[in-house]
Image: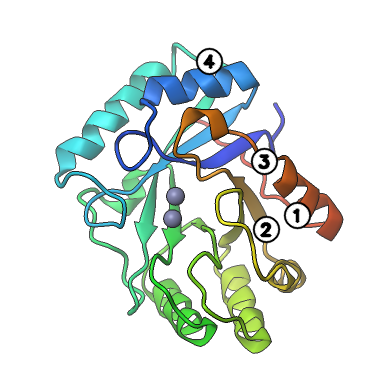
Amino acid sequence: MDPFGYDLHIHSEYSDGSGSVKEIVRRASTVGINTIAICDHFWPCHGSKKAGTKWIEQRREKIWNLRPVFKSVRIMDGAEVDISSNGSPAGIAAPLDSFDIILGSVHFGTTSTQWRSTIQRALGKWRFDILAHWDGYLSSFREEDGIAVARILADNDVAVEISAYYVCRFPEFFIMARDAGCEFTLGSDSHNVSSIGVLDEQKEIVQALELPLRRIDWTS
Ligand SMILES: [Zn+2]
Ligand SMILES: [Zn+2]
């Protein structure tokens, strides 16, 4: 199995996506992706729909039920969790370690200096696997902040997402992160099933900048 044949950032109707869990898995199977991470926003995260544990449990049960049906696709039960300005994670209704994968996301406008202190505080408090759309909400980018964040991410084994939804405006950060020892992941941040796995431009960035992609050898 191709350890890089994945899309690790997909939204379903459990947050602000339009596809059902089944439609997402079927689409991944049709286009030949072997690993997907369905990473919804759960209450009180930006883009979430409903509060309560049941909402998370209901989606989890659907994922579990589909695993034996679509054996060619590994389905990760993930969440995209807001990083608040003081670094704390949004308090979603299930423990973060009950998910297979956690994306950490800054969803508020910020300078790179504030962003740097937010990421620094966050990783002093909790653990996420991937920093999603790292510059999606940045209003500015200073090299020294980029180098500092790259080092923090590398030290904490957090991968840097190459997003298809938020076009990267400061690609020099990818080089800083690569040189600091970070790994990278690909995510469509798909909100409808037709954009699942549409990652050709992101793969070109990986090749052009020689970025090391994180292997996903995940087993359920
Ligand atoms: Zn996001
Ligand atoms: Zn997202």
Mark 1–mark 2 distance (CA, rounded to whole Å): 5 Å
Q: Residue furthest top?
A: 69
> Label 2, on which residue?
183
Between the residue at mark 3 and the residue at mark 4, the CA separation in whole angstroms equals 23 Å
Where disc 3 sits, the SS reads loop
Amino acid at the residue labelled 1: Pro
Taking the spot 79% from the left edge, 48% from the top edge, the residue there is 204
Q: Which mark is residue 199?
A: 3
Report crowding for label 2: few under 14, some 14 to 19, many 20 or more residues within 10 A (C-alpha).
many
Residue 220, visible in the rendered structure? no
Tags 1 and 2 touching, CB below 8 Å: yes
**Residue at image location 57% in from the left, 76% down from the top:** 152
Residue 212 circle label: 1
Whichever of labels 3 and 4 marks the residue nearer the N terminus, that label is 4
Say whether residue 93 is left or right of residue 19.
Answer: left
Q: Earlier in the sequence, mark 1 or mark 3?
A: 3
Of the residues under marks 4 and 2, which one precedes in the sequence?
4
